[in-house]
Structures are given as C-alpha cells and as structure tokens.
Amino acid sequence: MSFQPSTFNQLADKAIGHVKKDLATLRTGKATTQMLDPIRVEVYGSEMKIAELANASAPDPNLLVIKPWDSSILNNIEKAIASSGLNLNPVVDGDIIRIAIAPLTEERRKEMVKSLYQKVESGRVMIRSIRTDVKQNIENQDGEANVSEDDVRRDLKELDKLTQLKIDEIDELAKYKEKDLMTI
C-alpha cells in the first residue's frame, strides 16, 4: 500500500474547516449572522441554534435583527443571547430582537488579532499532527514487499509538500481575517 494524498487531504480539510468555524466566531466589529452560530437556545425541550428558530439578518454593519418564526420563544432567544458570553445586548422590540453591534476599539482589535493567531496556531498543530500520523504510516511501509526506499522517500516528500500547502491555506485565512479585524 502506498501513500494516499486524498486521505491526508480529507483529514487536513476537516481541520481547516474547524479553523474556519473557529475564526468565524471572532467579532470584526461588523454585524454578521455567523456571530450567533455558537448560541444554543433552550426551547421545545431541547437546545437549538438560532438559525433553526428564527430569521436572522444584518440590515446594516452595526445591527442584527432576529425574527422568530414562533413569537412565544422570543424571550428564550433573548435570554440565550444575553447569557452567551459574546457581549451582545439583545433588545426585544415587539416581535423582533435587535442587537446593536458597537464598533471595536483599537485595543480590542489587537486582542482579537492575538486570539486569531492562537486559533490559527491550533489549526497548524492539527495539520502537523495529521502529518505525523501519515508519516508514521509511510515509514512503516519500508521493507514491505513492492515498497522501496525510494518510494518511501518520494511519499514523504509529497507529504511535506501537501502539509505546507495546507498550512499556507490556514495562513491565508488568517491574513484575510486579520485585515477584516483591523479595518475600521
């Protein structure tokens, strides 16, 4: 059995997907409905995402509007947002919830960039961990029938190229997110 780049790519893409979700939780000072993704609302005997219970929109960069499909759960959604730890202050206005998004201060932006790079480093570690596992599998093939040292060396070289491509992809995400965070 030889090295399967598709297996490495699948695992690495899952790690990158995790990093993307993690980076989406960083507030950029602009209202986005993705800010609400980590919030779970206790309703109907279970926990549900806001997207499953309401229509959320960002009509302008400083405002989120949430309109539940069932107005009886308005207070449940409000409480979930208020207690989420995301520093969002929901205001019930009739049958909708409005959330004003304050612009980030320069100091807060710098804190967010630090957090961004912690999340990015975590992604790099995931990629390197996957690389280590795959490398071990490649090295274990040395000495098997129909596997030469050249095959192992070639596969390790290919693995290193793929690893660098995936780390570069994460770095590109970080660069874009940092630009987004530092834009006023």
Image: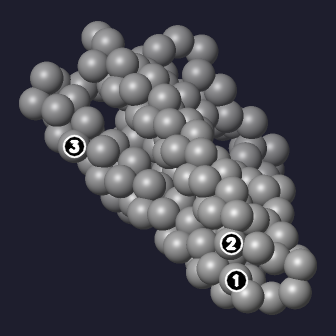
Point 30% across, 53% down: residue: 118
The amino acid at mark 3 is: Lys
Give whichever of 93, 177 is nearer the camera: 177
Identify the element where label 3 is drawn: helix
Spatial CA distance of label 2 from label 1 is 6 Å
Q: Where is residue 179, by image quadrant?
A: top left
Q: Residues within 10 Å of mark 2 (few under 14, many from 20)?
A: few
Point 48% across, 29% down: residue: 172
The amino acid at mark 1 is: Asp
Left-right relation of 43 to 85: right
Tag 2–tag 1 contact (CB < 8 Å):
yes
Q: Is residue 181 above or below residue 118?
A: above
Q: Is residue 100 above or below residue 154?
A: above
Q: Residues within 10 Å of mark 1 (few under 14, many from 20)?
A: some
Residue 5 locus on image (x, y percent)? 78, 56
Tag 2–tag 3 contact (CB < 8 Å):
no
Q: Where is residue 46, by image quadrant?
A: bottom right
Left-right relation of 132 to 152: left
Residue 102 locus on image (x, y percent)? 30, 25
Identify the element where label 1 is drawn: loop
Q: Residue 142 has which mark?
A: 1
Q: Where is residue 76, by image quadrant?
A: bottom right
Q: How many marks?
A: 3
Give whichever of 82, 116 is nearer the camera: 116
The residue that mark 3 highlights is 114
The residue that mark 2 highlights is 149
Q: Residues within 10 Å of mark 3 (few under 14, many from 20)?
A: few
Between marks 1 and 3 in the image, the one whose residue lies nearer the viewer: 1
Point 60% across, 15% down: residue: 59
Q: Is residue 175 above or below residue 12?
A: above
